[in-house]
Image (cartoon, rainbow, N blue to C red):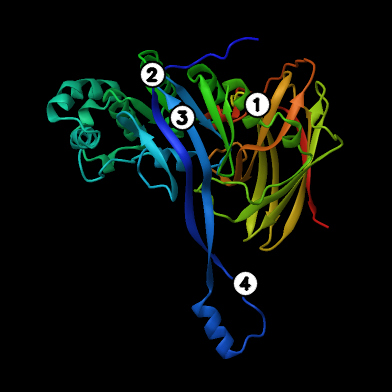
Amino acid sequence: MAEKTVDNRPVILKVENVGKKYVIRNMRTMPQNLTKGQMLRYKLKKYEKNDFWALKDISFEVRKGDRLAIVGRNGAGKSTLLKLISRITEPTEGRIEYYGRVAAMLEVGTGFNQELTGRENVYLNGAILGMSKEEIDKRFDGIVEFSEIGEFIDTPVKRYSSGMMVRLAFAVASTMDPDILIVDEVLSVGDMKFRDKCLRRMNEIATSGKTILCVSHVMGIVRGLCNRAIVLERGKMIYNGEVEHAIKLYNGIAEEARNTSRDLFDLPRPKYLNEKIRMMHVDIIENSTCIYKWNEPIRFLLRVEAKAEAKDVSLRAVFRCDSGTPASVAFLPLHADFKAGETKTIYVSVNQHNLAPGDYKVGLDLTQENPYDIFNNVDSITPEAFFITVKNLGSQDHEIEDDSARLWSNAWGNSRIMDVTGEVRDSE
């Protein structure tokens, strides 16, 4: 029997039985036919308070030199955990022990005073990390050079774009020589060239024996950077161990995640949506396993409910590989009109998908007017509304000329699924 390997590296971060509770308010349903007195009491107690545990019973250790990925679907509690570790907020229960200097890059602008200049914020962040002015002076030129915003360093950061803020935030966090570097998904805001530059810097930090904690939905980054991963699901830690197994859990390759019927109403949405219309439920039809042969049609029904009048609604389906890399996109210009309170079912048939063998997550976007426009989303479920697996290999060449190239998003992949049809039906 092989002996168990003993890891003698010192523990640099210890999380013990940590939980975070929030109190949320929900509007109570108003009963019918209330008297004036009952109506007054209802108005006084229109909202009811409920406890929501964003995290519960989280325990793990991080050793010096670890590169730990924290993965999970939207709303799993990843960013909340990083905020607790970064001491931005306090846990409701449990404790977190640190054995080194922590630098964090979380939401865009976190840790910056909007009224101060970039230069002043560099010194402010250094002071928060416990560094002297002399130490910050030595690193200042390197921070400005890495961030590539030299001519704007004395401009108030409230005038920075999100990309400029990300550049400066990462430069500060990574150059201040932290023992633990914490990076959230905000790298997705930067351009491709700067993201590559950040990844190279993170690899340099990792090989120098420092510790990295990162959150990413891009499994290629997780696979290339990290040596361990934990998986969160609805505030609980369901796995702590090898990266590849964590990626499989995250991607929902397990049979229980490959469902042919799924409620979509409560899945997280981007904050910018106007809530006019909402995808409620998806049913995969004519396939009981969600496993497809090459060019076997992928057909599904999407139930949609309009909260307000919505005109000229179309659909976009984005297929992503198990690594999180966008593979292909299918556009369905339905141009459907919805009345407030109306529920309809969209029938979709991807007749020839041309997808290579592998596991895929399918994201769905409802758009108004042109489905090729990335700015017209009225509802969006990313990265996955459902999962499929493709077997066998096939290819087919297509050529198309249209005006969508100027709006083409890297998040859609590099190819377009050409043969897709659909129609809108009144829900029964």
Location of mark 4 (residue): 29
In the rendered image, the quadrant that contains the N terminus is top right
Image quadrant where residue 391 sits: top right
Measured Cα–Cα span from mark 3 to mark 1: 22 Å
Q: Earlier in the sequence, mark 4 or mark 3?
A: 4
10 Å neighbourhood of mark 2: few (<14), some, or many (≥20)?
few
Location of mark 1 (residue): 248
Residue at the image position 21 percent from the left and 31 percent from the top: 153
Q: Position of residue 108 (x, y in %)?
A: 37, 39
Location of mark 2 (residue): 197
Q: Tell me, for residue 61, which label it has, or none.
A: 3
In the rendered image, is residue 335 in sight? yes
What amino acid is found at the position of numbered circle 3 in the picture?
Answer: Glu
What amino acid is found at the position of numbered circle 4 in the picture?
Answer: Thr
Secondary element under disc 4, as helix, strand or loop, is loop
Q: Position of residue 186 (x, y in %)?
A: 43, 34
What residue occupies the far right of the structure in this picture? 286
